[in-house]
Image (spheres, helix red, strand yellow):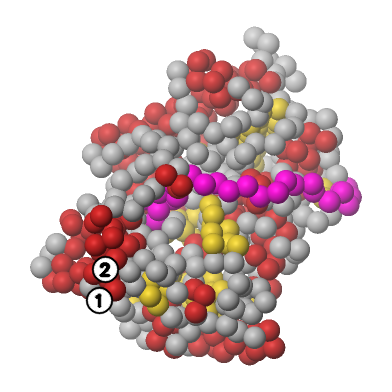
């Protein structure tokens, strides 16, 4: 299908809106803020889209673009672990075939812009500009395309350049979204693909960076809507899918500090003075655009002094408690560099512990298993008994008001299956209604006030409209694993039999086949302190 002017109309356009959900969208619809998105949702089939456990960006988007659960694609969180060492995940950790590579094998070209966990880019028929977990100025496919985009569009950003001033922050969001839309349209014009996939991350990050700021939220969604309007008017795609990886909502319950709980049980051992493995805290300043590599950091004299103080019991946790009594904890804490916080914090001594939480966004507890971890303390023949004991204890945890902290505490096999199951946490802990927050921090008490007033929820949104879409179809029960099979069906490409989802009833089903094993590449380190700080700024680490 060709439109006048020479540009090819994509057969299918997928619009990814991180954290979009009906409770956020519907008030914007009612205010007339986002008419293009409202038309996409109202004109065809739409409904809730259930995410996975854990419903977090870095794991959920690979589930969307592969159609497989984390046990099959290998990414469970923003972090990946090798023994007690960690790294930020990237595309080399994804062990399953992305939908654009599958389409390429069947003769269909694609343009992919800003989808998380796609750096470094792999070759296929089309173009790819990576999204979250990529460094600023990432390598792209084909080589040199980012320079071409910056010349043609006046610039490009993976992450917004903004600051604490509300107007500056909003302008940074709008500028990043404008660059995103312009780059996507440029690539659609340049490559004339059959499949287009663009993702907007700011619909999520605005809730983490400016919680409760309705003006900022509206500005982000208006900016996204304007870019979609321009894209749809110019390229007239035959079919459009709108998908989100999860929802978002207010956290009105408690923060459960799992490592404090495990410390009280004797499962977690701690150290001070920078000798234990670090826990994450918010970075003082965003080094994302400065390009500082992790290997470049040298310890300051102040960090060394704080380590000495920590060794005699003057930890940042104790200092924070004192500051809190005089009303200075928040203003001073916001100005303390995270390296200093980490140097003086009480920290989990992972090699000496029996079980611990490594990262809050994987929603799980890991067991320090002998023969799997370098200094495992739990013998293999005691693994099931230790895991069962931990599950039973966590299921019994109640908030100070007597309500269950978790709606489910289950072995990982309940949620995952596949060859990469061992990469995931041993136990999954699902907060009750996602109204309680899980934390890995050691802060001197098991319960506290949630640090972030907004956090992820499991239910996102999906909308489907177009010439090949049954707009009257029910999308009840749709999950993020159904997106990739549905894309296959819309191109009449055989579905990978290993996909966990099914074709949504908006289109006719297609055949299945067993594909050759995916030939990934050996994982490479992200090794970029700026990416880590960006994720920490957003509260993910």
x%, y% of residue 41? 56, 42
* Residue where numbered disc 1 is placed: 312
Q: Residue at x 26, y 68 (%)?
A: 308
Q: Secondary structure at mark 1?
A: loop
- In the displayed structure image, the side of residue 298 where residue 4 appears, left or right: right
Please name whichever residue, 261 or 47, is drawn nearer the observer in this view of the structure: 261
Query: What is the quadrant of the N terminus in the image?
Result: top right
Q: Are marks 1 and 2 in contact (CB under 8 Å)?
A: yes
Q: Residue at x 34, y 77 (%)?
A: 447
Q: Residue at x 54, y 67 (%)?
A: 84
- In the displayed structure image, the side of residue 333 where residue 378 appears, left or right: right
- In the displayed structure image, the side of residue 382 where residue 321 appears, left or right: left
Q: Residue at x 28, y 58 (%)?
A: 303
Please name whichever residue, 409 or 425, is drawn nearer the observer in this view of the structure: 425
Q: Main secondary structure of the magenta part?
A: loop
Question: Is 529 inside the magenta-drawn segment?
Answer: yes
x%, y% of residue 253? 36, 71
Q: Report whether residue 472 is seen.
A: no
Q: Which residues are magenta?
A: 511-539
* Residue where numbered disc 2 is placed: 308
Q: Report whether residue 517 is seen.
A: yes
Q: Quadrant of residue 198?
A: top right
Q: Residue furthest top?
A: 5
Please name whichever residue, 122 or 51, is drawn nearer the observer in this view of the structure: 122
CA separation in Å, label 1 and label 2: 7 Å
Residue 105 numbered tag: none
Please name whichever residue, 34 or 400, is drawn nearer the observer in this view of the structure: 400
Question: Is 363 inside the magenta-drawn segment?
Answer: no
In the displayed structure, would residue 368 be above or below residue 305? Answer: below
x%, y% of residue 372? 66, 73
x%, y% of residue 330? 20, 59
């Amino acid at each position: 299908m060709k439109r006048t002017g020479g540009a090819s109309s994509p057969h299918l356009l997928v619009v990814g809106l991180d954290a979009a959900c009906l409770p956020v969208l519907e008030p914007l619809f009612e205010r007339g803020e986002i008419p293009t998105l409202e038309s996409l949702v109202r004109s065809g089939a739409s409904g809730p889209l259930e995410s996975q456990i854990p419903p977090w960006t870095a794991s959920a988007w690979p589930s969307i673009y592969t159609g497989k659960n984390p046990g099959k694609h290998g990414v469970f969180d923003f972090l990946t672990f090798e023994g007690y060492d960690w790294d930020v995940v990237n595309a080399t950790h994804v062990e399953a075939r992305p939908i654009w590579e599958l389409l390429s094998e069947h003769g269909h070209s694609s343009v992919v812009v800003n989808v998380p966990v796609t750096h470094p880019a792999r070759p296929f028929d089309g173009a790819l500009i990576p999204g979250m977990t990529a460094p600023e100025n990432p390598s792209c496919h084909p080589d040199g395309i980012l320079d071409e985009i910056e010349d043609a569009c006046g610039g490009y950003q993976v992450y917004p350049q903004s600051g604490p001033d509300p107007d500056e922050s909003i302008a940074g969001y709008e500028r990043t979204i404008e660059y995103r839309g312009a780059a996507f349209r440029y690539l659609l014009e340049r490559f004339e693909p059959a499949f287009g996939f663009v993702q907007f991350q700011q619909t999520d990050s605005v809730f983490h960076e400016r919680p409760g700021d309705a003006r900022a939220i509206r500005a982000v969604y208006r900016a996204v809507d304007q870019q979609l309007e321009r894209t749809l008017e110019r390229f007239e795609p035959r079919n459009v899918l709108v998908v989100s990886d999860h929802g978002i909502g207010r956290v009105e319950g408690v923060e459960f500090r799992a490592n404090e709980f495990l410390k009280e049980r004797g499962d977690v051992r701690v150290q001070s003075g920078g000798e234990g493995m670090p826990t994450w805290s918010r970075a003082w300043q965003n080094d994302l655009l400065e390009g500082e590599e992790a290997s470049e950091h040298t310890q300051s004299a102040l960090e060394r002094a704080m380590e000495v103080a920590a060794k005699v019991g003057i930890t940042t946790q104790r200092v924070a408690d004192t500051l809190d009594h005089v009303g200075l904890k928040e203003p001073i804490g916001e100005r303390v560099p995270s390296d200093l916080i980490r140097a003086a914090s009480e920290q989990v001594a992972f090699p000496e512990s029996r079980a611990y939480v490594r990262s809050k966004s994987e929603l799980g507890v890991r067991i320090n298993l002998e023969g799997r971890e370098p200094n495992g303390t739990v013998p293999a023949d005691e693994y099931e008994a230790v895991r069962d004991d931990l599950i039973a204890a966590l299921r019994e945890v109640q908030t100070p008001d007597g309500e269950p902290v978790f709606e489910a505490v289950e072995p990982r096999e309940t949620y995952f299956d596949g060859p990469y199951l061992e990469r995931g946490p041993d136990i999954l802990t699902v907060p009750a209604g996602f109204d309680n927050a899980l934390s890995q921090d050691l802060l001197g008490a098991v319960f506290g006030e949630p640090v972030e007033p907004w956090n992820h929820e499991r239910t996102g949104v999906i909308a489907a409209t177009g010439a090949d879409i049954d707009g009257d179809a029910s999308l009840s029960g749709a999950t993020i694993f159904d997106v990739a099979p549905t894309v296959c069906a819309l191109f009449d490409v055989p579905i990978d039999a290993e996909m966990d989802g099914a074709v949504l009833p908006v289109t006719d089903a297609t055949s299945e086949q067993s594909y050759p094993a995916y030939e990934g590449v050996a994982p490479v380190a992200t090794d970029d302190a700026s990416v880590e700080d960006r994720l920490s700024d957003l509260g993910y680490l």
